[in-house]
Amino acid sequence: VSVRTSARRLLGELVRRGWEGVSSLGAITSGDPRARRFHSFGANSSVCFPTAALHGTDRIALGSYTMVGPYSTLSAGQPFLPPVPHAVDAEPMLRIGDGCLLGRNATVTAHRSIVIGDAVWMGDGVFISDQNHAWDDPEQPIGAQASEPQAVSIGAGSWIGNGAMILPGAVIGERCVVAAGAVVTGPVPDHTIVAGVPARVLGSTATSRELGA
Amino acid sequence: VRARPTKLGMAAGDVIRRGWEVAGRLATIYSGGRRARRFYAFGENSSICFPWSTLLGDDRIAIGVDTMVGPYSTLSAGLPLQPPNPPWAGPTLTIGDRCLIGRSATITAHRDIVIGDDVWMGNGVYITDQNHDWSDPEVPMGAQAQEPRPVHIGDGSWIGNGAMILPGSSIGRRCVVAAGAVVTGPVPDHAIVAGVPAKVIGSTLTSVPDRPAASA
């Protein structure tokens, strides 16, 4: 093996170890100065490095034993505007319970109220928002207009599949399954399995383990 | 994630996070910068956020003014190892003025993708003008390509999170493409489309949210 090849291998190993070290140290964990900027940040929780965007963290409450994967966005309030300081006694705009797992590349953008219950596990790339754009004013681009926010909630013990989208007005019960890629825009009763675009009821988690058909 | 945070570890973490934020600001591609000049056009006050996923064929990509492309995105025009864009040729991928393209976008142009002005997109939007092909049974599909079909998105439209805009899509002005929708053909001006495959469910000419029926 030539000197050049060994040097390359050594450098590559340094980059890998460095990145692992940086990722581990860069994660926001309970007690960190950055964690103290949150409305609350429970024990043994973490937001993995690197984050895509964190906005209005003083309006975000995170339970304990909860992990948010890397490349994720957690946002509370109006992005692109300077954050308005949050009243100390006010309710958080985005609440994530205990023992939750949010996969990599998640986007959770709250404008009024998003509540994620305890022990909710999500795949990667899940999108959750409580506000849509609007088209009332024909002179303005649709993207520059916003409709009235509609609160979103996800009940305890539910499972949100990879790439699912939970849109304004979605109220998901306890122990529900939202299948991969599903788009939810309304109420989903407790113990329901939903799938598809738009999401439809496929079965129940109260009965057997088999899916649909 | 470290099991037991130490004071030193926390301080190091803070330095890393701040460093990452500063690096992000410094390495983002802004108009007027050295990297921006490689593009076919790169309008004033526009930016491509760091870190990007892939940038390919910059000299075939035209970006308007006041446009932002979110981080972890791919903008691709042409193929790897292509010769430089000849001086008489126009851009392969055109993005208009005042557009907002969310994080983790993938836009791969082979012949012609045009995004108009004031188009806002959610995260993870996928746009391409060429599909793979399966005509030759001896060759893997990934190594075969169909004829590209141009893609167009009209001014003032809104593309929802995770939507997929596939070859031959021609989306009009002030349209709404709902989250997760898959578009493969024409969408008339002012139409609201949703689903897989996308179907017309309303119009942006009528007043706001005639909300689609509850999901369950």
Image (tube, coloured by chain):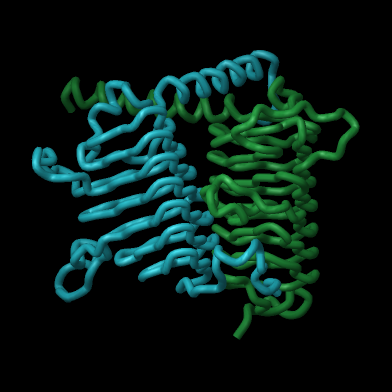
Chain colours: A green, B cyan
The quarter holding residue A64 reads: top right
Residue B55 left/right relative to B118: left
The answer to which of A195 and B25 lies nearer the viewer is B25
Q: Residue at x 73, y 77 (%)?
A: A204
* Residue drawn 54% across the image and 60% down it: B179
Q: Is residue B187 above or below residue B112?
A: below
Q: Evaluate whether residue A193 shows in this view.
A: no
Q: Position of residue B101 (x, y in %)?
A: 45, 44
Question: Which residue extends farthest front?
Answer: A139
Say which of A4 and B27 sits in front.
B27
Q: Based on the displayed image, in which of its 4 quarters is residue A54 positioned?
A: top right
Q: Is residue B211 left or right of residue A139?
A: right
Q: Is residue A118 visible?
A: yes
Above or below, comparing residue B203 to residue A10 in the picture: below
Rendering coords of residue B85 (x, y %)? 13, 41
List x then y, in percent, for residue B71.
45, 37
Q: Residue sitting at 75 percent across and 68 percent down? A: A187
Task: Write down the quadrant of residue A77 in the picture.
Answer: top right
Q: Does residue B102 appear left or right of residue B116 in this picture?
A: right
The quadrant of the rendering that contains the N terminus of chain B is: top right
